[in-house]
Amino acid sequence: MGITDACTDLAREISRSGFVEVFTHHDADGIAAAAIIAAAMSRAGVQFRVRVRQRVTTDDLKTDDPILLTDLGASLPDLPEKVMVIDHHHPRFKGANHVNPRLFGIDGEHELSAAGTAFLVAQGLGDNRDLAGLVLCGIIGDGQNLAGPNKEIIQEAMALGVIEPGRGILLPGRDLQERLYLATNPFLSGVSGNQPAIDDILEKSQGSGGEDVKTLLSLVILESATSLHPGAMLALFGDVYHLGREVIDDASSLAMVMDACGKTGHGGLALAIGLRETGSVEAGWEVTRKHRTDVVQALISLKGCEEGVFSVENPTVASDVADAIAGTWRPDAPILVYACRDGSCRISARSPVESSTDLGELMDKLGRDAGGHGGGHRTRAGATIPADGFKGFSESFRGAVRV
């Protein structure tokens, strides 16, 4: 049986349910996956409730209602057999209702996200091809490639006019000022969070028809080049995607807003935006601007404790700070970012694609060894542990990845 048949079978299982309890991961990919499947269930007449979580345990699933996990659950071998799972992480759950690209020889790390997998299931509930813009949010949010099934989904969506490609500045935001102010990947040292510098750049790049993009980018690079890894400059301009069916047109901006809302405890707001509730957009941007400003300020005041290990004060920004460091300064070396608060440490780790260490497996092991939990992807993973176990965790991490 291939993944298409598995998606059809799971869609049939969902459609037989009068009500489905959905739990989803709190990042852009997880929320996009939940929004896709929720929209498809609504159209098919299946009632549901969605809860956005950083993680779930078997204790969260004590209900007689049908349960569906999106972007969660694959790594939990002790889930109840009846639980339905749509995920792309390493599969340990052996239940029959588990759709995961890795179970079918598809690269779940780079070529099919949870949102993409949910999209395939959604087609078994009806014609839901208009939801492909949310797949792009999952791809962007998880740093995946436009290859394999991802590419097939997006190309079909372009042919249907659901997604419109273009060229432009890749930084997310509502206008150029906000794009520069909130830039974190890459983090533009001397520009990000620096309003006077941004005003100066925008004034100097003015042409007869508005801002001249070439001049603007040149000024940004001149200001930030000494701190940018050469590859990071390529993340400033390139292929952009417009989502005419969604309430936020720019794909990168939609992914940023959903991710920021989810990670800051506003998962319901993120889901509402994914479900095209226009009244939620302004509130979503307010949450996002505050969160990204916190990330920018953390990067400005970043402290390196040891080679490759960085400390921030706010646990909520640790993941985004790790992405920024890996994308801006250290794309060729493993890094770890941590924040300790109220007796607990939130840890985010990143490593180069070519690294021989699987960070997801390493974070899972080190997290459990320290009395907490962890997991994730091969190059992007995290853990939450008791604060008094961080020193040993850090030493084990540095030894394993040879920082």
Image (cartoon, helix red, strand yellow):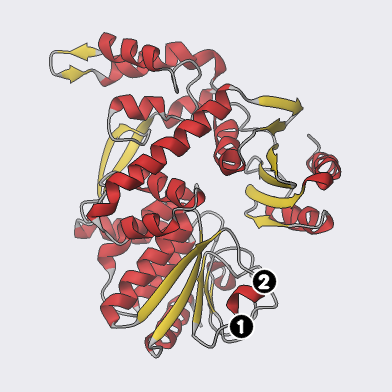
Quadrant location of the C terminus?
A: top right
- In the picture shown, does residue 180 fall above or below 134? above
- In the picture shown, does residue 313 fall above or below 212? below
| Residue at the spot of label 1 | 95
Q: Which secondary structure lies at badge 2?
A: loop
Which quadrant of the figure has residue 39?
Answer: bottom left
Q: Nearer the viewer, residue 105 or 395?
A: 395
Q: Amino acid at mark 2?
A: Leu
- In the picture shown, does residue 371 fall above or below 301? below
Where is residue 226 drawn, in percent x and y?
54, 13
Q: Residues within 10 Å of mark 2 (few under 14, many from 20)?
A: some
Does residue 251 appear in this view? no
Earlier residue among tags 1 and 2: 2
Nearer the observer: mark 1 or 2; the answer is 2
Q: How many marks?
A: 2
Q: Amino acid at mark 1?
A: Gly
| Residue at the spot of label 2 | 76
Does residue 370 appear in this view? yes
Q: Nearer the viewer, residue 152 or 367?
A: 367
Relative to residue 25, is residue 207 drawn left or right? left
Relative to residue 295, is residue 222 drawn left or right? left
The residue positioned farthest toward the left in the image shown: 208
Report the residue at 76% width, 27% height from top.
305
Where is residue 21 drawn, in percent x and y?
47, 77
Q: Which secondary structure lies at badge 1?
A: loop
Q: Residues within 10 Å of mark 1 (few under 14, many from 20)?
A: some
